[in-house]
Structure formats: structure tokens, C-alpha cells
């Protein structure tokens, strides 16, 4: 990983350590839910396990891409459909009945990008915002002035750009929050950032009125419009 | 009505805690953050607190300090049930006791059964 990490460890060590901290939450959930010995909990246990697996998958995908063991293949992707899939997934895994998700797909073009990477990036955005206690999310895709596609998740939280910089560095533990808007180690956000870079994109914090959120901008050079 | 106030930001885990304690004859109210917890406690005093120290926009130690600042709540026992290892907090046993923390249970290694036992030592279901 290209993220700077102090303390004499290389990036992979640092992100592995942060990943382990991040995985603690879903594994605790699974263990304690299993203790209930209640078959009706099976679905929740499965969703939590899938959440943990996706985090590991993202890490592996990112590490493979970073070290050249795997090229991220471009495939035709509809940004709107990815937003929808992630919103459904996020609602399932949070278990919050009052999680309000609004879909706002302004750009519905089919573009060439890496579908799994894009899913992981959006999933990480949503997870960070929900972890921060937010219950209202807007999933939005739009075409930017330079022709790029932007996909992002916005919330009522007021995120500062300086917080994002801190969040993207892997220097903390899950219980020592790196940024005020998140209670976790932000490893998922860091992985998302690296994945975004690997598909030629960039992650930024955008503000729309009182709304703040993350946007992954996929550059035009990586997009071959199929329409 | 006597009840245990569980402060757990993870709603799924919170529901598991509530269900397990309910099965063991404890009445439980859940709070996702410290503000909710104070508001619930203000309406009806709990008999014990189960506390995750990592709570959004606050931390558990600050919550304990605020909670203890109200004279009505000074004697309410607290059981910490957290994913943070106790040694990472940097408090010794005497300091924990001064906060009224009767037991510190580390989530990854302490089960809901352990939590129930700790509560049974403090309050009768």
C-alpha cells in the first residue's frame, strides 16, 4: 500500500493490523449472536459474516493490485445499478430499521471500470458514515464538468477535508479514532482509497449545503462510454 | 420498574445483549450513545449500567464522569463490556473502583454468559 505509515513497519503490516482491529467488530457480533442459540438470528449472523468477508476481500483485492499480482479488469458498469446494490447491501448489514437511504442517480451511463472495486469503495463510504452514527444517506452518481463520473455517498455529517486526510492514514486502532466522524480505524476507507487509485480515480470530500460525504471520481480516461 | 441500561453503539450487538439478558430475567433498555443513555436514565433510574467505552462523539470514561456527577446516580454499579482491552485504558484497579466500575469484561474473550454472571453478582434479576 502506498499509504505512509510511521513506526518502522511497512504499509502492509500497518494495514493488516488495522484490518484485524476492524474485523474484531463483526466477529464479536457473530460470536455473541451465536450465543443466543436462536435460529432466527442465522440471517443476521450470515450478513455480518459477509460484511467481514467483504472487508477481507477488499484488502486482498487491493494488496494484489498494489503488488501487481492481479490486474483490475475493466468491465462495463452502470454506476446507478452499483449504487442500488450497495444501498441494499448496506441496509441489510446495518440492521438499523431507521436507516434512510435515498438514491439519486444523475449519471446512468454505462462506463468501463472495475465493478468489484467500485462496490468496495462505495460500501466503505457507507460503512464509515453509518459507523459515525448517521442514519440518513444519499447515494448519488453524476457527471462532472470534465466528463468524469462521480459516485458518492452523502450524509448529514459535517466532514472536514483535514479529517479525511487523517482518516486515510493507517496510524490508529479501532478504539482510538483517527477522525471525529468515525469510531473505527478507517481501514476500510483507506482500502477504498487505494482501490480508487488503482482504477485511476481519486477520493474527495464534497460538501453540498449542509451535507458532507465522500465521492469517488472516476476519470474520463478510464471510461469508455458504451452508449 | 428496575432495569439495566446497556449503552452499546452497535445495535445488532445491543439487541443480542438485550435478548440474552432478557432470557435471564433481566429487564434491559438499550442506548446507542451517551446522550440517549442520560435521557433514559433521567426518566427512570437504572439498577446497573452495561457500558461499551467506544461510543460515538464521546468516550466511555467521559460518560462515566458525567454520569457520576449527578448525585442520584453515584451508587449505580457499572459493568464495562468493551472491545477495548482494559490495559489500553491506562487506569489501575483503584481508579476503576473510584468510578464505580465493578467489573471490566473484554468482549472478544468474555461471553454474554460472563456478562450475565457479573450482573447477577450486582443485582438480582
Image (cartoon, rainbow, N blue to C red):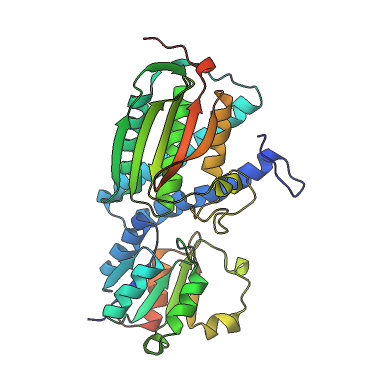
Residue A49 seen anywhere in this rendered image of the structure: no
Q: Quadrant of the C terminus of chain A?
A: top left
Q: How many marks?
A: 0
The residue that appears at 35% across and 71% down in the rendered structure is B37
In the image: residue A90, left or right of residue A158 = left
Q: Is residue A172 shown above or below A110?
A: below
* The quadrant where residue B92 appears: bottom right
Residue A94 seen anywhere in this rendered image of the structure: yes
Which of the two residues, B27 or A187, is positioned nearer the viewer here? A187
The residue that appears at 45% across and 84% down in the rendered structure is B69
* The quadrant where residue A196 appears: top right
Q: Residue furthest top?
A: A226
Which of the two residues, A203 or A143, is positioned nearer the viewer here? A143
> Residue B114's spot in the image, x, y percent?
43, 69
The residue that appears at 63% across and 22% down in the rendered structure is A69
Q: Is residue B53 shown above or below B77?
A: above
In the image: residue A6, left or right of residue A209 = right
The residue that appears at 55% across and 56% down in the rendered structure is A177
* The quadrant where residue A144 appears: top left
> Residue B94's spot in the image, x, y percent?
59, 84
Which of the two residues, A67 or A123, is positioned nearer the viewer here? A123
Q: Quadrant of the N terminus of chain A?
A: top right
Q: Residue furthest left?
A: B1
Q: Is residue A224 shown above or below A184?
A: above
> Residue B42's spot in the image, x, y percent?
31, 79
> Residue A50's spot in the image, x, y percent?
40, 39
Amino acid at each position: 500500500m502506498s499509504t505512509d505509515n510511521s513506526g518502522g513497519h511497512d504499509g502492509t503490516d500497518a494495514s493488516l493490523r488495522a484490518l484485524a482491529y476492524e474485523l474484531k467488530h463483526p466477529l464479536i457480533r457473530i460470536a455473541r449472536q451465536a450465543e443466543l442459540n436462536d435460529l432466527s438470528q442465522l440471517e443476521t449472523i450470515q450478513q455480518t459474516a459477509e460484511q467481514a468477508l467483504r472487508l477481507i476481500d477488499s484488502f486482498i483485492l487491493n494488496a494484489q493490485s498494489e503488488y501487481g499480482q492481479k490486474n483490475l479488469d475493466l468491465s462495463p458498469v452502470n454506476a446507478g445499478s452499483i449504487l442500488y446494490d450497495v444501498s441494499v447491501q448496506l441496509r441489510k448489514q446495518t440492521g438499523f430499521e431507521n436507516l434512510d437511504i435515498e438514491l439519486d442517480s444523475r449519471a446512468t451511463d454505462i462506463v468501463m471500470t472495475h465493478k468489484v472495486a467500485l462496490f468496495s469503495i462505495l460500501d466503505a463510504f457507507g460503512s464509515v458514515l453509518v459507523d459515525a452514527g448517521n442514519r440518513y444517506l444519499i447515494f448519488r452518481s453524476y457527471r462532472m464538468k470534465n466528463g468524469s463520473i462521480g459516485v458518492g455517498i452523502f450524509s448529514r455529517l459535517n466532514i472536514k477535508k483535514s479529517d479525511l486526510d487523517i482518516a486515510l492514514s493507517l496510524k490508529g486502532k479501532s478504539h482510538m479514532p483517527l477522525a471525529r466522524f468515525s469510531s473505527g480505524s478507517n481501514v476500510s476507507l483507506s482500502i477504498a482509497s487505494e482501490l480508487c487509485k488503482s482504477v485511476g480515480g481519486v477520493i474527495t470530500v464534497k460538501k453540498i449545503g449542509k451535507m458532507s460525504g465522500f465521492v469517488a471520481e472516476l476519470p474520463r480516461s478510464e471510461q469508455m462510454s458504451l452508449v | 420498574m428496575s432495569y439495566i441500561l446497556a449503552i452499546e453503539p452497535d445495535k445488532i450487538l445491543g439487541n443480542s445483549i438485550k435478548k440474552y439478558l432478557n432470557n435471564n430475567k433481566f429487564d434491559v433498555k438499550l442506548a446507542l450513545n451517551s446522550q440517549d443513555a442520560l435521557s433514559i436514565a433521567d426518566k427512570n433510574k437504572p439498577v446497573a449500567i452495561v457500558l461499551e467505552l467506544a461510543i460515538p462523539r464521546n468516550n466511555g470514561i467521559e460518560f462515566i464522569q458525567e454520569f457520576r456527577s449527578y448525585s442520584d446516580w453515584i451508587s449505580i454499579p457499572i459493568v464495562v463490556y468493551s472491545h477495548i482491552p482494559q490495559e489500553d485504558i491506562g487506569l489501575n484497579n483503584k481508579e476503576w473502583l473510584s468510578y464505580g466500575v465493578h467489573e471490566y469484561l473484554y468482549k472478544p474473550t468474555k461471553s454474554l454468559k460472563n456478562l450475565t454472571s457479573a450482573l447477577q453478582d450486582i443485582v438480582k434479576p
